[in-house]
Image (tube, rainbow, N blue to C red):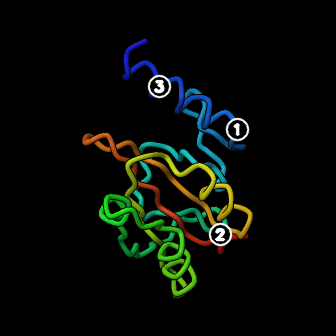
Amino acid sequence: MNSLKLNAVHRRKISHRVPGKTVKGTPAAPSAMDPPASQSPGDTPRGGQRGRVQFKALDVRPLLAQGIEPYAEIRRRIDLLPGGAGLSLVAPFLPAPLIEKLKSEGFLSRVERRTDGAWTVYFWRDTGG
């Protein structure tokens, strides 16, 4: 199986675990990991309306290349996020355990596969209701 097919299969398996996945053009629920393509990373659902989130960027690839575990820095950045802000995390792999951990803490997320093979994951707090 080539890598493109493997990535599509892997993404589909991840998406199926998340409630509210976009299916055949149906809008995703606010808790979806994979919102509709028309939604930009900064546009987040809030009580049925879209709000703007400012994302702080963190690329953990240099930390990993130095043999440094990035969780402490990710946690620090997450804990320092002011209201209306989110974290844009770039990693060489899909950090599924981190996504699940932050989801349990009330964060929503959106994942994107980058053209360089890395992943960008946007995290923001669920402030809508």
> Looking at the image, which is closer to me, 51 or 10?
10
Would you place residue 3 above or below residue 100 in this image?
above
Q: Residues within 10 Å of mark 1 (few under 14, many from 20)?
A: few
Q: Return the residue at label 2.
A: 126
Q: Return the residue at label 1.
A: 17
Would you place residue 18 above or below residue 84 in this image?
above
Residue 121 lies left or right of residue 118; in this view the side is: right
Which of the image's four quarters has the C terminus? bottom right
Residue 48 lies left or right of residue 111; in this view the side is: right
N-term-proximal mark, 1 vs 3: 3
Q: Return the residue at label 3.
A: 8
| Label 2 with label 1: CB-CB less than 8 Å | no
Residue 38, how many percent across, how many down? 41, 46
Q: Amino acid at mark 1?
A: Arg
Residue 64, how many percent across, how many down? 38, 60
> Looking at the image, which is closer to me, 67 or 120?
67
Most extreme residue toward the left is 116
Could you give the CA–CA distance between mark 2 and mark 3, rounded to whole angstroms? 27 Å
Would you place residue 16 above or below residue 30 in this image?
above
Residue 74, how many percent across, how many down? 50, 72
Q: Could you say which quadrant of the image residue 58 lies in?
A: bottom left
Q: Residues within 10 Å of mark 2 (few under 14, many from 20)?
A: some
